[in-house]
Amino acid sequence: MVAVAARGARETVDDPSVVRERLEVFAGEVLLGAVNRPVQLVNGGLYLRGLIEDGSRKSLEPLVARLSGEADYESLQQFLAVSSWDPTRVLKATAERVAPVIDVQAWVLDDTGFPKDGKHSPGVKRQYSGTLGKIGNCQIGVSVHAVGGKGTVPLGWALYLPEEWCEDPERRAKAKIPEEIEFQTKPELGVGLIEQAGGWDVPRAPVLGDEAYGKDSKLRERLHQAGFAYVLSIDADASVFAPEAVFAVPARRERAGRPRARLRPDREPEHVAELLDRLAPQNLHTVTFRDGPEGKPITSRFCFLRVRALKRWKHGAAEQPREEWLICEWPAGQDQPSDYWISNLPADTAPEQLARLARMRWKIELDYKQLKGELGLDHYEGRSWLGWYHHTALVTAAHGFLTLERQNPNRPRPA
């Protein structure tokens, strides 16, 4: 029987055997295009059951024990760590099943830590982890999630591989890291995941992310060029050109010589904090929007300015730099703004929409909480690069099944 582990699904009074039948159908649908052997399809279904059934640990040994003799440990280990099935296809199939029912409102880009002992798990090192709140021995996984009014669904996972790992052939060989894998920053990994999911049948929505992603101008430009809107956090030290800045071709000082062609600004950029200290007080708006776990109305003060962010500007620009929104929240009674964002949303975007999106990123924490606390996202104990990707894809599928269960209108509810 399937004893559903997720909090939202505990509300069901469905017969466990009926839930199990639905899980078997779902597993077949999301795994069929990814696996290439019948035994892989069987093992994938068993692994999903093991992730969903009650149990404090979702690593392989206790998972197999919960399946009461139905699963073979060696076969499941082979399936997870070595078999050449495609985890991306599982993610795609899951996302395309779940996204239509959750009212997608944003895509959230973030990363999370996977605490580890030892030094052999791929990508592990002493590094900062938001999960730990400090520097610790861990892996870092970058992920993208579609978040909506009725749930969330992960769209992709990427394991961050530090440079010392990339340059260590022996460690790479032991962890079976493919030769083509090269060092990429977390923003590079993240934008790659977004571009990949952008080709799926999933509703696009503005991309949200914290300062680690918002400060990366290359990431913002890649998103813009790929047709993605974004609302990304930045810090007070980021530099932008004020709304009144003018970019124009300067007049030649002498008649002879080559005509100037590049646009140059009539002033230097300013730090965000300095610009807002100068302009925000007369441009503050009280905005009410729906946010929070229950969608309750929230009222706060915001400033919205049209600015230009140009990292390389001293030699001029070939064309007019595009305008972006500089957004800050400045709660009443505080001496300075609490948060800052930059966005490429259109100039006619409503203030309520800008404020709501800027504040929506908190939903990713609920996603990580369920993925880790209930489905064992961080319980994988293997030392295989491919195994990590297989595990995160299957956890995503389990998460997707539970989301569909909560949205199933035909599911019985408690009296």
Image (tube, helix red, strand yellow):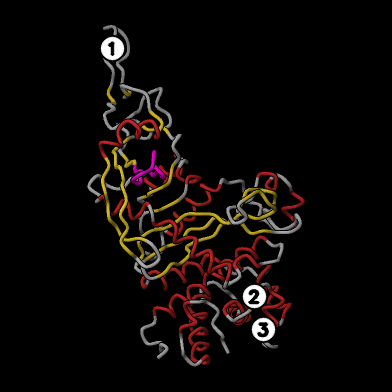
User: For this rendering, which residue is in front, 12 or 183?
Assistant: 12
User: For this rendering, which residue is in front, 301 or 374?
Assistant: 301
Horizontal side of residue 392 vs 120, given as left or right: left
Query: Looking at the image, which residue is at 56% across and 85% down?
Result: 3
Mark 2 packing: few (<14 Cα in 10 Å), some, or many (20+)? some
For the residues labelled 3 and 1, the Cα–Cα distance comes to 79 Å
For label 2, the SS is loop
Instruction: Give residue 165's position: percent from left, percent from top.
Output: 69, 48
Instruction: Give residue 320's position: percent from left, percent from top.
Output: 29, 32
For label 1, the SS is loop
- Assign the C terminus to one quadrant of the image: bottom left
| Tag nearer the camera, 3 or 1 | 3
As displayed, is residue 274 above or below residue 361? Answer: above
Q: Which residue is mark 1?
A: 252
The extreme left residue here reads 348
Instruction: Give residue 291's position: percent from left, percent from top.
Output: 35, 60
Horizontal side of residue 316 vs 6, given as left or right: left
Total residue callouts: 3
For the residues labelled 1 and 2, the Cα–Cα distance comes to 73 Å
Q: Which residues are magenta?
A: 327-341
As displayed, is residue 265 above or below residue 56? Answer: above
As displayed, is residue 285 above or below residue 83? Answer: above
Query: Looking at the image, which residue is at 39% across and 34% down?
Result: 272
| Tag nearer the camera, 2 or 3 | 2
- Rendered image: mark on residue 56: 2
User: For this rendering, which residue is in front, 44 or 338?
Assistant: 338
* Amino acid type assigned to the residue bearing label 1 in the image: Arg
- Rendered image: mark on residue 66: 3
* Amino acid type assigned to the residue bearing label 3 in the image: Arg
Among the 4 quarters of the image, the one containing residue 43: bottom right
